[in-house]
Image: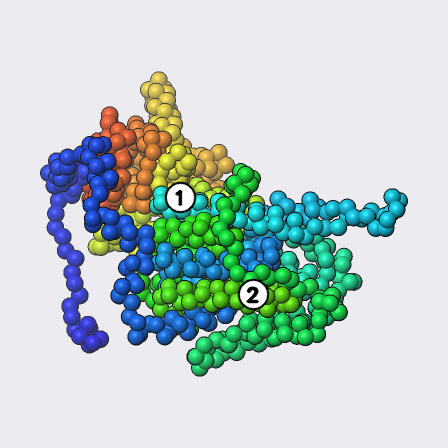
C-alpha cells in the first residue's frame, strides 16, 4: 500500500484567474439565490401545523424508548442487560443509603431516589450506559441547602428533669421534626430543579452546559469531594458535631471534629477503617483482574451485608454506642405535592443544582456515546433529568444525576441499553418493599467508608494541575479558582466565582489577541508569521497584518493599537514628519544659503527622544549611528504604501468596530497609505453590509477574497517587484517605486 502511494504522483494545485475583489465578485461572479421571505403568518403556520408525521416524530423524540424497544435484539442483548442491571443495582443500594446522609435526610429517601428516577430515565433518556441516581456532589449541595434552611438550632425543645418547679431544664434536639422539615426542603428543591431542567429542555437550552468548562467542573468536583470527605469524618470517628454550611464551612467542620477527637468511639473508628481498607482492596482486585472477572466483585454490598450482620449480632448500637441507620420503613410512600411555599427561598440553589447535575450527566453520556458509536441528544437528556426530578419529587426523592462509578460498572459488565437501568431500579424496589428493615442496624461509619472510597476518582483529578501547567495555564487558573472558591466559600458561592473567572478568561483572551505580520512563502501563495518561519518573506512596500480575534466594542481600540505597533506605520507620526518637512522647506525658501547639498534633508533624532516606529522602520532595526541614534529621513514617499488586513480569523463585528476600521482607512488615506481587507467570510460581509460599512470612501473594491489577491493587487498598483528572500536596507538617496 505504501509503495502504491509512493508511486502515485503528487496532486497539483494550479489555478489561473484574474485578481478578484469584492466589487467584481458581487457584480460578475456571485449571484445570490432569489428567496421569497416568509411572512410571520406563514412561519407560525409552518411551526404549528399538525400532522401524523409531526405527531409521531414528537412522540419518538419525547419518548426515546419508542425508537429502540420495538427493535430490541432480545437474544443478543437481554442476558448482558440482566447481568449489568443486577450488578449496577447491587452498587446502587449502598450508595443510595450513603448519599442520603450527605443530603441530610433519612437513609430510606436515598433508596426512593435510587428507584423512581432510574425507572423513569428508561423511558425518557437517550444514553445506554449512564447510571442515573444519587451522586455525592449533588447530594452534598442539597445537604448544604437544607442544613442552612433547617439548622439543628431550630429544633431544640426544652425538657424538665425532675418533678419540682426548680428542676433543671435542658434542651433536647427533636430529631423527627428536624428530619421531617429537611425532607420537605429537599423535596421542594428537587421539584424546582426538575422544573428548571424541564423548561430549559423544552426551550432547547441543552447548550448551557458548555459554559461549565471541563477545568471548571473538575476543579469544582474535586472541591466537592473535599467537602464530602470532611463531612464524613464525624461518622468515621463516632463523634457528634454540628453540620455547617456556607463560607468556610469546611474549616469550621474540621475544627469541630478536632475539638471532639478526644471522645472518638474506638469501635466505630475500627469498623470504618476496616471497611475502607477492604473496599480499596476489592477495587484494586476489580481493576487488576477486570478482564478475567465476568462481573466486578460487589465489595460495597459485601461490606453492607457483613457489617449489618456484625452490628446486629453484637448489638453495637446498644452496647458500644455505634451510630446506625435506624428505622427504615418498608413499602413506598403515597405521592404528595411538594411544599410550594418553600420554593421562593430555593430558586438560586435549585438553578445551580440543575446546571451542575445536567453538566455531569451530559459529559458522561457523551463520553460513553463516543466510545460505543452512538449519539445522545443534549436537549432530550435535559428533559429526561427534568422529568426524573420533577415527577420523583412527588414521591419524596431528592435531586439526582448520573454517577461515574455506577456508570463504569454498568458499562464494564456489558450493559447494552437502558433496560439495564430498569432492572437495577427493580432490584432497589424489591429491597424497599420487602427487606428494607434489614438495614436498620447498618453502622453509619460503613456508609461513610463507602462514600470516601468512591471519592478516589475525584481526588485523582488533582493530576490535572501539572498537565494544565504544561498545556494551558489559562485553564489552570480556572481549575484552581474553581477548586479554591468552592472549597473555601462553599459549593454555591464557589460555583458562581468559578463561572465568573471562566467568563473573565474569555474576556481576557479577547482583550489579548495575538497579532502578527504575515509574509509570503515564495511561490506558494501561502502567508505565515514572519517572526516564526524563516521562509516567510515580506513583500516590499506591503505589510500584512493579522489579529486572531473579532473586532467589536471591547477590543477595537486594541486592534488599532496593535496595527500601528506591528506594522510600524503611524499616521500621526507620518503627518508630523510631513509638517516638519514643509516647515523646513519654507525656511529654506526664505534662506536659500541654508539649503542642504543635493536637495536632500535629514535629521538625526536621539533614541530617547524618538522611541517609536516610523512607517515600517522598527525603532530597533533602522540605521543607527555610533552614538545609538536613529536617522529618520524627511521627504520622499513612505516606504510602506499598502496595508493588508487579514480578516480570516474575524468572526463578527459590531458598529463600534466598523467605526474604528473606517477611521483607520481614513487616517491612512490621508498619508497616502492604502488599506486593503482580505479573507472575509460571506457571513461577515453580510454583517458589514447591514452596518453600512461600504459607504463613503469605503467601497467593496478594497475587499479581496484572499490575502494573495490583495497582495497581487497592491503590486500591480505600485508596480512593485516580487518578494526577495532578504529585505535590503532602504537607501535614503534612492527613489521609491
Q: Nearer the viewer, residue 430 or 33?
A: 430
Residue with the most extreme bottom position: 292
Local packing at callout 1 (Cα closer than 10 Å; few below 14, some 14-19, many 20+) is: some
Q: Position of residue 100 (x, y in %)?
A: 57, 58
Q: Which residue is mark 2?
A: 436
Quadrant for the C terminus in the image: top left
Q: Residue at x 30, y 35 (%)?
A: 638
SS at badge 1 = helix
Quadrant for the N terminus in the image: bottom left
Q: Position of residue 308 (x, y in %)?
A: 62, 71
Q: Which residue is mark 1?
A: 199
Q: Nearer the viewer, residue 507 or 6?
A: 507
Q: Residue at x 49, y 55 (%)?
A: 400
In the rendered structure, the answer to whether residue 728 lies left or right of residue 716 reads: right
Cα distance, mark 2 to mark 1? 35 Å
Q: Disc 2 vs disc 1: which is toward the camera? A: 2
Q: Position of residue 229 (x, y in %)?
A: 62, 60
In the rendered structure, the answer to whether residue 441 lies left or right of residue 693 reads: right
Q: Residue at x 44, y 44 (%)?
A: 196
Q: Nearer the viewer, residue 708 or 38?
A: 38
Residue with the most extreme top position: 590
Q: Which mark is residue 615?
A: none
Amino acid at each position: 500500500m505504501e509503495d502504491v502511494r509512493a508511486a502515485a504522483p503528487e496532486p497539483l494545485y494550479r489555478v489561473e484567474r484574474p485578481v478578484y475583489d469584492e466589487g467584481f465578485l458581487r457584480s460578475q461572479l456571485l449571484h445570490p439565490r432569489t428567496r421569497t421571505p416568509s411572512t410571520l403568518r406563514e412561519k407560525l403556520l409552518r411551526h404549528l401545523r399538525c400532522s401524523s408525521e409531526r405527531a409521531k416524530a414528537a412522540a419518538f423524540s419525547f419518548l426515546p424508548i419508542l425508537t429502540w424497544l420495538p427493535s430490541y435484539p432480545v437474544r443478543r442483548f437481554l442476558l448482558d442487560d440482566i447481568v449489568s442491571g443486577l450488578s449496577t443495582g447491587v452498587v446502587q443500594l449502598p450508595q443510595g443509603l450513603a448519599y442520603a446522609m450527605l443530603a441530610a435526610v433519612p437513609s430510606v429517601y436515598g433508596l426512593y431516589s435510587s428507584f423512581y428516577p432510574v425507572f423513569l430515565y428508561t423511558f425518557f433518556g437517550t444514553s445506554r450506559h449512564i447510571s442515573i441516581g444519587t451522586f455525592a456532589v449533588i447530594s452534598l449541595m442539597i445537604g448544604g441547602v437544607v442544613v442552612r434552611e433547617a439548622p439543628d438550632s431550630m429544633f431544640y425543645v426544652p425538657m424538665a428533669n425532675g418533678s419540682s418547679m426548680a428542676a433543671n431544664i435542658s434542651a433536647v434536639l427533636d430529631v423527627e421534626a428536624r428530619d421531617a422539615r429537611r425532607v420537605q426542603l429537599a423535596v421542594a428543591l428537587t421539584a424546582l430543579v426538575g422544573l428548571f431542567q424541564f423548561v430549559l429542555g423544552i426551550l432547547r437550552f441543552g447548550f448551557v452546559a458548555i459554559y461549565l468548562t471541563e477545568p471548571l467542573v473538575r476543579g469544582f468536583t474535586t472541591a466537592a469531594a473535599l467537602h464530602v470527605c470532611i463531612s464524613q469524618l464525624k461518622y468515621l470517628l463516632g463523634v457528634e458535631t454540628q453540620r455547617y454550611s456556607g463560607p468556610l464551612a469546611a474549616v469550621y467542620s474540621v475544627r469541630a471534629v478536632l475539638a471532639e477527637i478526644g471522645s472518638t468511639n474506638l469501635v466505630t473508628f475500627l469498623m470504618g477503617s476496616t471497611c475502607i481498607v477492604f473496599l480499596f482492596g476489592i477495587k484494586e482486585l476489580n481493576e487488576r483482574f477486570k478482564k478475567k472477572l465476568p462481573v466486578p466483585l460487589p465489595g460495597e454490598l459485601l461490606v453492607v451485608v457483613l457489617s449489618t450482620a456484625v452490628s446486629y449480632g453484637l448489638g453495637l448500637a446498644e452496647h458500644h454506642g455505634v451510630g446506625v441507620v435506624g428505622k427504615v420503613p418498608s413499602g413506598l410512600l403515597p405521592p404528595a405535592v411538594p411544599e410550594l411555599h418553600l420554593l421562593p427561598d430555593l430558586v438560586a440553589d435549585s438553578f445551580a443544582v440543575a446546571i451542575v447535575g445536567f453538566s455531569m450527566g451530559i459529559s458522561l453520556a457523551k463520553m460513553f456515546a463516543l466510545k460505543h458509536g452512538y449519539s445522545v441528544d443534549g436537549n432530550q437528556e435535559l428533559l429526561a433529568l427534568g422529568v426524573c426530578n420533577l415527577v420523583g419529587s412527588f414521591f419524596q426523592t431528592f435531586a439526582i444525576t448520573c454517577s461515574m462509578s455506577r456508570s463504569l460498572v454498568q458499562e464494564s459488565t456489558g450493559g447494552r441499553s437502558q433496560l439495564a437501568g430498569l432492572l437495577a431500579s427493580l432490584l432497589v424496589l424489591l429491597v424497599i418493599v420487602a427487606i428494607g428493615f434489614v438495614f436498620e442496624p447498618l453502622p453509619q461509619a460503613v456508609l461513610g467508608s463507602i462514600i470516601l472510597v468512591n471519592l478516589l476518582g475525584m481526588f485523582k483529578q488533582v493530576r490535572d494541575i501539572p498537565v494544565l501547567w504544561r498545556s494551558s495555564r489559562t485553564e489552570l487558573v480556572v481549575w484552581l479558582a474553581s477548586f479554591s472558591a468552592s472549597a473555601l466559600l462553599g459549593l454555591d458561592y464557589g460555583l458562581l466565582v468559578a463561572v465568573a473567572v471562566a467568563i473573565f478568561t474569555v474576556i481576557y483572551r479577547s482583550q489579548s489577541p495575538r497579532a502578527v505580520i504575515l509574509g509570503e512563502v515564495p511561490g506558494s501563495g501561502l502567508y505565515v508569521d514572519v517572526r516564526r518561519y524563516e521562509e516567510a518573506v515580506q513583500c516590499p512596500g506591503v505589510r500584512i497584518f493579522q489579529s486572531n480575534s473579532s473586532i467589536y466594542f471591547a477590543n477595537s481600540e486594541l486592534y488599532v493599537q496593535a496595527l500601528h505597533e506591528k506594522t510600524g506605520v503611524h499616521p500621526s507620526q507620518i503627518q508630523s514628519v510631513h509638517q516638519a518637512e514643509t516647515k523646513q522647506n519654507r525656511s529654506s525658501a526664505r534662506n536659500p544659503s541654508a539649503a542642504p547639498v543635493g536637495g536632500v534633508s535629514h535629521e538625526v533624532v536621539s533614541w530617547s527622544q524618538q522611541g517609536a516606529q516610523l512607517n515600517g522602520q522598527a525603532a530597533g532595526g533602522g540605521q543607527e549611528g555610533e552614538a545609538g541614534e536613529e536617522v529618520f529621513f524627511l521627504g520622499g514617499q513612505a516606504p510602506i504604501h499598502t496595508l493588508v488586513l487579514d480578516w480570516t480569523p474575524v468572526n463578527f463585528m459590531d458598529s463600534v468596530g466598523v467605526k474604528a476600521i473606517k477611521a483607520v482607512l481614513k487616517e491612512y488615506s490621508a498619508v497616502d497609505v492604502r488599506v486593503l481587507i482580505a479573507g472575509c467570510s460571506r457571513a461577515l460581509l453580510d454583517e458589514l453590509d447591514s452596518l453600512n460599512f461600504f459607504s463613503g470612501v469605503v467601497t467593496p473594491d478594497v475587499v479581496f477574497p484572499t490575502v494573495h489577491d490583495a497582495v497581487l493587487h497592491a503590486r500591480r498598483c505600485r508596480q512593485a517587484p516580487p518578494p526577495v528572500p532578504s529585505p535590503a536596507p532602504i537607501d535614503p538617496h534612492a527613489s521609491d517605486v
